[in-house]
Amino acid sequence: MPHLADFPPMLLDERPVDFDEPGWLYEIKFDGYRVAAEFDGEVRLRTRNGTDCTKWFPEITQALAKVKGGQYIVDGEMCVLDELGRSDFDKLHDRARRRRWYEGASPVVYCVFDLLVYRGVDISQQPLVQRKAALAKLFKPAKPGILVVRHFDDQPQRIFEEAVIPLKLEGLVAKRAASTYQPGVRSTDWVKVKRKGAVPPERFNRGKR
């Protein structure tokens, strides 16, 4: 049976991207903590560096525990979102550093973008578009605190200019539609397209992808 520890996160390359090149899909990049989750009635959460963070976010573990038919393993970003759906990394960091829920804690949202194990079967080597289709079905109907990260493959340049820049989002993630999941690898199949000035350099040692 697959285990959560078998899937250290696949990491993003950062280089120029040709928005006109076919075979890519795009996601809005959320500014949070990279977290993988395993759930089969019981829930285990793991940060990018392998720390068990299951007790840090009880509202998310409660939601995942209600998903039937496991075992499942998903990859995603733990975030605090504002009223426009933008990530607030500083509020997330304040919440996460206490490693528990507390009175007045900012609610978190688990922004899930990949499905690696489906009902005990490792599907990480299936094409990304197939994994994302299965992920969307897994979380229908929607679960509280869980956001399935949607993707698009049309007009990424326009979306970058008309949504990412004016809303001051972190950026986009470009992924080859046919890519497999490569645990622990910084792959050219997944590329970070940052908005200029989006993330201070000192933040990169705090759980980011």
Image: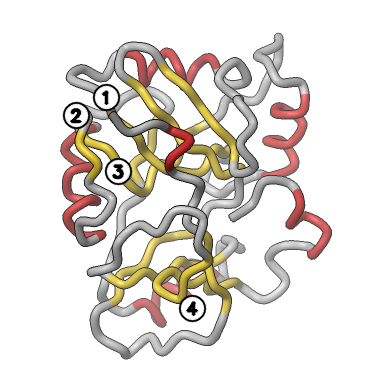
Looking at the rendered image, the disc whose residue lies closer to the viewer, 3 or 1, is 1
Percent position of residue 89, x then y: 68, 45
Looking at the rendered image, the disc whose residue lies closer to the viewer, 3 or 2, is 2
- Which residue bears the numbered disc 4? 161
Q: Residues within 10 Å of mark 3 (few under 14, many from 20)?
A: many
* Pointer 2 or 1: first along the chain: 1
State the residue at coordinates (79%, 64%).
Answer: 201
State the residue at coordinates (39%, 61%).
Answer: 27
- Which residue bears the numbered disc 2? 119
Residue type at the position of mark 1: Gln
What is the secondary structure assignment of the residue under circle 3? Answer: strand
Residue type at the position of mark 4: Glu
Q: Decide: marks 3, 2 in contact (CB < 8 A)?
A: no
Residue type at the position of mark 3: Leu
Q: Decide: marks 2, 1 in contact (CB < 8 A)?
A: yes
Q: Is 199 placed left or right of 174 in the picture?
A: right
Between marks 2 and 1, how big is the CA–CA gap? 5 Å
Figure quadrant of residue 43: top left
Percent position of residue 91, x then y: 71, 36
Question: Of 10 and 6, which appears nearest the observer?
Answer: 6
Q: For the N terminus, give its image quadrant.
A: top left
Count of labels in the image: 4
Depicted 166 relative to depicted 60: above or below: below
Q: Residues within 10 Å of mark 1 (few under 14, many from 20)?
A: many
State the residue at coordinates (42%, 13%).
Answer: 62
Question: Of 182 and 62, which appears nearest the observer?
Answer: 182
- Which residue bears the numbered disc 1? 71
Residue type at the position of mark 2: Arg
